[in-house]
Amino acid sequence: DAGVTQSPTHLIKTRGQQVTLRCSPKSGHDTVSWYQQALGQGPQFIFQYYEEEERQRGNFPDRFSGHQFPNYSSELNVNALLLGDSALYLCASSLAGPGTDTQYFGPGTRLTVL
Amino acid sequence: AQTVTQSQPEMSVQEAETVTLSCTYDTSESNYYLFWYKQPPSRQMILVIRQEAYKQQNATENRFSVNFQKAAKSFSLKISDSQLGDTAMYFCAFLPGTSYGKLTFGQGTILTVHP
């Protein structure tokens, strides 16, 4: 039973560039959430995708966008990168339904913006 | 908006001993879920234990148990018979019952288990 996978593992970009991160959910899951985790901090919710639509969004600017594909995998796109976007980006998958349930996390993508 | 507070930035314990990590939260929701996640240096966030607010019984998973005090909005994690592999950052997290997956995390507690 495959868990949540993310790619790439590490990424280095320069200010102003754009980046795409990818996530495949745990087998049987249909919902993907994205979080940003700054060094030494707890993760912050970016948004959640279900049925290929953004269902809920945290306090992140429009430079952060996403997509979900028919196979439930998801992408996180960040435009016009800032130094402050350097962080660990975590993807989590779960089953649909308000308040359900447990989110299972991937290993994360470490993004460094120079 | 919900807030989650972990007041212990760092904790340490000897192998085989018991340690308790604290977590308090603030919410106006009546239905919600609480979680403890563990993040070792490898950075993979791993679920430790889950509690449903409407259940009075405290959750238990092997060596891990919680003390859930709903009125006090407290949700502490007890680790018994600590092992070296328990060394990690531990996060308390809150999920409203009406939310579509927006977990709110605390700041984390770094736990070090010494041999």
Image (cartoon, rainbow, N blue to C red):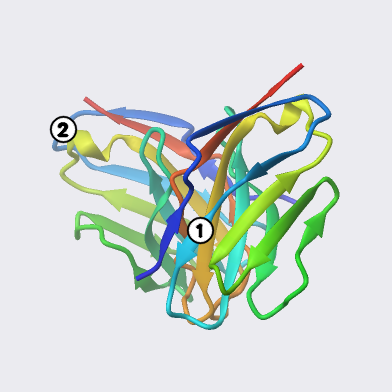
Q: Nearer the viewer, mark 2 or mark 1?
A: 1
Residue A61 versus residue A57 in the image, above or below:
above
In this view of the protein, which residue sits in the foreground, A44 or A97?
A44
> Residue A53 at what x, y percent from top left?
39, 74
Give the Cα separation between the discs numbered 2 and 1.
Answer: 38 Å
In this view of the protein, which residue sits in the foreground, A74 or B16?
B16
Q: Is residue B93 left or right of residue B79?
A: left
**Quadrant that contains the C terminus of chain A:** top left
Residue B107 versus residue A53 in the image, above or below:
above
The residue at 58%/45% (across/down) is: A5
Residue B76 visible at all? yes
Can you identify the residue that label 1 sits on? B24
In this view of the protein, which residue sits in the foreground, B30 or A90?
B30
Q: Tell me the subunit letter for badge 1.
A: B
Amino acid at dot 1:
Thr
Residue ranking furthest to the top: B115
Disc marking residue A15: 2
Q: Is residue B107 left or right of residue A77?
A: right
> Residue B40 at what x, y percent from top left?
61, 32
Q: How many C-alpha atoms fall within 10 Å of the one at disc 2: few (<14), some, or many (≥20)?
A: some
Report which quarter residue B31 is drawn in: bottom right
Residue A38 versus residue A28 in the image, above or below:
above
Residue A27 visible at all? no
Q: Is residue B41 left or right of residue A18?
A: right
Residue A97 versus residue A84 in the image, above or below:
below
User: Dot 2: what SS?
Assistant: loop
Q: How many C-alpha atoms fall within 10 Å of the one at disc 1: few (<14), some, or many (≥20)?
A: many
The residue at 13%/37% (across/down) is: A16
The residue at 47%/76% (across/down) is: B99
